[in-house]
Image (cartoon, rainbow, N blue to C red):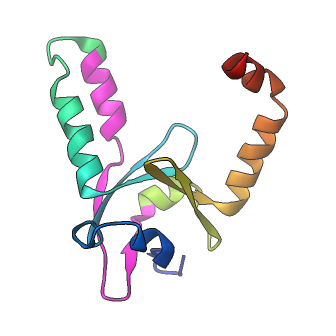
Amino acid sequence: MDAKGRLLVPADFCKQLPETERTRFHVKITKVGSLTLYTETQWAIAEAQLARLNPLKAKAMEFKRQFLDGYRTLEVDSANRILIPKNLQDAAGLSKDIVFWAMGDQVEIWDAARKEAYMKSLEEDIELTDDLFS
């Protein structure tokens, strides 16, 4: 990421997307201190799921507020970069060294040092693997 908060979208990532999905992304902060990047199609699915929540239920509205907190739409510029707003850079602890972490149909944007610390914390929690796969 450069000093202005612009992040080059990896070419390998873009090649996997249809051309219509390469010009705009949606991003939001996660509970673990990263950003989740959504394509237009993925965001439309998320919006549809949010729209099904009952607005008369307090828990549903709390979830919706939490999910949308820090949400932004990001346009891809002519140099294939996205501008990460300062509040999201700060929330995710982003520095110059950034990692795009593909997780199935989702991509997370992590500060490299924060991701390393997160993975180390998971390694220390062997019970997580035992709980999921036993």
Residue 51 part of the magenta segment: no
Q: Which residue is drawn at 24% across and 56% down?
A: 40
- Displayed quadrant of residue 112: bottom right
Q: Residue 104 in the image: x percent, y percent? A: 49, 47
Query: Going by the image, does 132 lie left or right of 81?
Result: right
Query: Going by the image, does 74 lie left or right of 32?
Result: left
Query: Going by the image, does 129 lie left or right of 10?
Result: right
Placement of the C terminus among the 4 image quadrants: top right
Q: Magenta stretch?
A: 60-86
Placement of the N terminus among the 4 image quadrants: bottom right
In this rendered view, identify the residue nearer to me: 5 or 38: 38
> Relative to 49, is 84 above or below?
below
> Relative to 3, is 95 above or below?
above
- Displayed quadrant of residue 50: top left
Residue 80 part of the magenta segment: yes
In this rendered view, identify the residue nearer to me: 108 or 35: 108
Q: Which residue is drawn at 29% across and 48% down?
A: 42
Q: Is residue 31 visible?
A: yes
Q: Which residue is drawn at 33% across and 25% down?
A: 63
Q: Residue 29 in the image: x percent, y percent? A: 44, 47
Among all residues in the image, which is located at the extreme top?
Answer: 57
Q: How many marks?
A: 0
Query: Going by the image, does 91 lie left or right of 97?
Result: left
